[in-house]
Amino acid sequence: MLVLARKKGQSIVIGRNVRVFVAEVSGETVRLGIEAPPEMEIFREEIYRQLREENTGSITTPMEARGFLSKNTDKKIRIIPEGS
Amino acid sequence: MENNGRQTGVVISFPWGMPGLDYNEYILSSLATDSPFYFLQSTACPEVGLLLINPFSVYEDYEFDLDEESARQLEIGDQNHVAVFCTVNTSLGADSATVNLLAPIVINSDCLLGKQVVLNDKRYSLRTPLVICRGDQGEGR
């Protein structure tokens, strides 16, 4: 792994099309600006990992989905927001 | 194919994929008449699918701003041509189903492009409980 030291306002370039610059440094938080081609998705890593896990865990078959639905056709379904 | 529409079996392309899923093309279909539930089924692997819900039908205060980049990618100009769904996770059983409000699936229903968008909104979670009222509390449809 390459480790580089950068100051506020300085950048690194990755390949031809990606530029990451240090926009702000405040205590332990670094704010980064990223310029990348639109086809390149950018995620916060922990969010990406959680989303991948959630999507994988949500995979179901048509039969299972219909089974879930058949148990809940006559029920009132809603979401109660957190904190209420 | 608006959220309250009846059209079924529409092929949606997900050029950017979805984290954890290996496919880029899915068939979106309604699971039952007047149901908030939909099914997103891989065209390449029919046994792989996601149970979806129209979030607005179960949580009327749900709202978010689509980021400019996603709007541009999805070629969205007119809000009327956007459909929003959230994945439902029933892996812990029908009584413990959760909804992913943090990463909704946004679809341009004109050009049939879809993308799972991660919101930067602390109000929403990947696993919001779906409350299913039983017995007398339920207003049967």
Image (cartoon, rainbow, N blue to C red):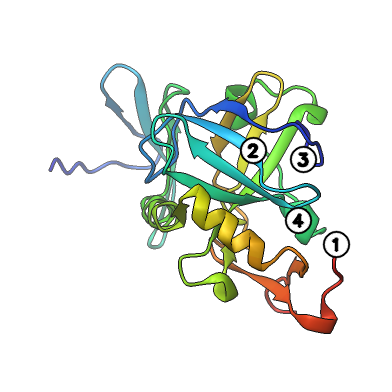
Residue appearing at x 78%, y 53% in the figure: B56
User: Do marks 1 and 3 share a chain?
Assistant: yes
Q: Secondary structure at mark 4?
A: loop
Residue A48 pos. (x, y %): 40, 50
Q: Check the residue under mark 2 and report the chain it is in.
A: B
The answer for how far apart the CA atoms under marks 2 and 3 are is: 11 Å
Q: Check the residue under mark 3 and report the chain it is in.
A: B
The answer for how far apart the CA atoms under marks 4 and 3 are is: 14 Å
Does residue B54 appear to the left or right of B129 in the view shown? Answer: right
- Circle 3: residue type: Asn
**Residues at marks 2 and 1 touching, judged by CB atoms closer than 8 Å:** no
State which quarter of the image contains the C terminus of chain B.
bottom right
- Circle 4: residue type: Tyr
Precedes in sequence: disc 1 or disc 3? 3
- Circle 1: residue type: Arg
Residue B117 pos. (x, y %): 56, 41
Q: Which residue is mark 3?
A: B3
Q: Nearer the viewer, mark 2 or mark 3?
A: 2
Q: Is residue B95 above or below residue B39?
A: below
Does residue B86 appear to the left or right of B132 in the view shown? Answer: left
Q: Secondary structure at mark 1?
A: loop
Q: Secondary structure at mark 2?
A: strand
Residue in front for this viewpoint, A58 or B103: A58
State which quarter of the image contains the N terminus of chain B.
top right
The answer for how far apart the CA atoms under marks 4 and 1 are is: 22 Å
Q: Which residue is mark 2?
A: B29
Q: Which residue is mark 4?
A: B62
Numbered badge on residue B59: none
Precedes in sequence: disc 4 or disc 3? 3
